[in-house]
Image (spheres, rainbow, N blue to C red):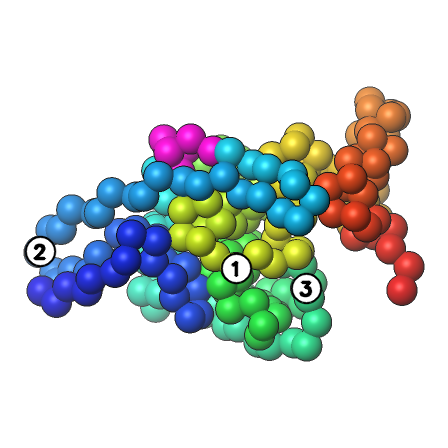
Amino acid sequence: MNRQVFPSRPRSPGRFRAAVLLSATVAAGCAAAAPELPDPRPIVIYSGARIRVEKERMDSINAWVTREQTNIEQDPGFWVIVDYGVDEVYPWEGMRLGEDTVRMRIDPRASDSRLVFEIYGHLHLMTKMGRQEEFLPEAPTATGFDLEQAILARTADAWLLGRAVFDTTPYGPLDELMYAKEAGYLDAFIFTARPNEFAEARADWARAKPQEADEYRNWFVQTFNRDPPGLRTG
């Protein structure tokens, strides 16, 4: 069994790696203990907004990120393909979903985001292929907005793991998603960024929380010094 030695906060040129896959390539029938994750560090952006996370939560996220990454790389029944664009992109932008293939568009300047984008596409593909319960046990029958919310929650958590534990380089679209989810504004983030989708769920949200759209916009501007996606001009 070949082993590799990595620093305590490993970095990869193409993606951050979950801890189990950082340790080794394990031959059939050969068991190896996963290395312990380093303690997470606070995440701070230029506005001073901070996120602090518990190690137990990072261990839990790392476990399912590892399963996702292993399945993406080793399951021969489907393809997750990456294409490159020239601009910042949100995970849902440019995704093309086929019967057994999903293509994701990423910003080549943000190589650390690759695994997170692959996870987003993989979760959509697994749902289409009848494996939703396997990979989204918290939302085994969700559809429409509820499905997208569950997938984006996992996407945000995967990026949180990368930023807090693996020291991935900040990337605007994923940082926005992560901060919004941690602040309790995931629904507002989705409805604002994608105003032409999820009409029924959006209407229910607006009736139930009539002040949240303005609260979210104010929070976003204070946190990122610009309007949220969906409200920007130019």
**Mark toward the start of the polypeptide (2 vs 3):** 2
Rendered image quadrant of residue 40 = top left
**Mark toward the start of the polypeptide (3 vs 1):** 3
Amino acid, disc 3: Val
- Residue 54 appears anywhere in the view: yes
Query: Is 57 covered by the magenta stretch?
Result: yes
- Residue 141 marker: none
Residue tagged by mark 2?
A: 30
Residue tagged by mark 3?
A: 89
Query: Is 212 covered by the magenta stretch?
Result: no
Compared across the picture, whether 28 is left or right of 215 comes to left
Q: Nearer the viewer, residue 87 or 146?
A: 87
Residue tagged by mark 1?
A: 169
**Residue 37 coordinates in the image, percent (x, y):** 30, 43
Q: Quadrant of the N terminus?
A: bottom left
- Classify mark 3: helix, strand or loop: loop
Q: Nearer the viewer, residue 196 or 50?
A: 50
Amino acid, disc 2: Cys
Residue that sits furthest to the top in the current view = 208
**Going 43% across and 64% down the picture, which residue do you hit?**
15
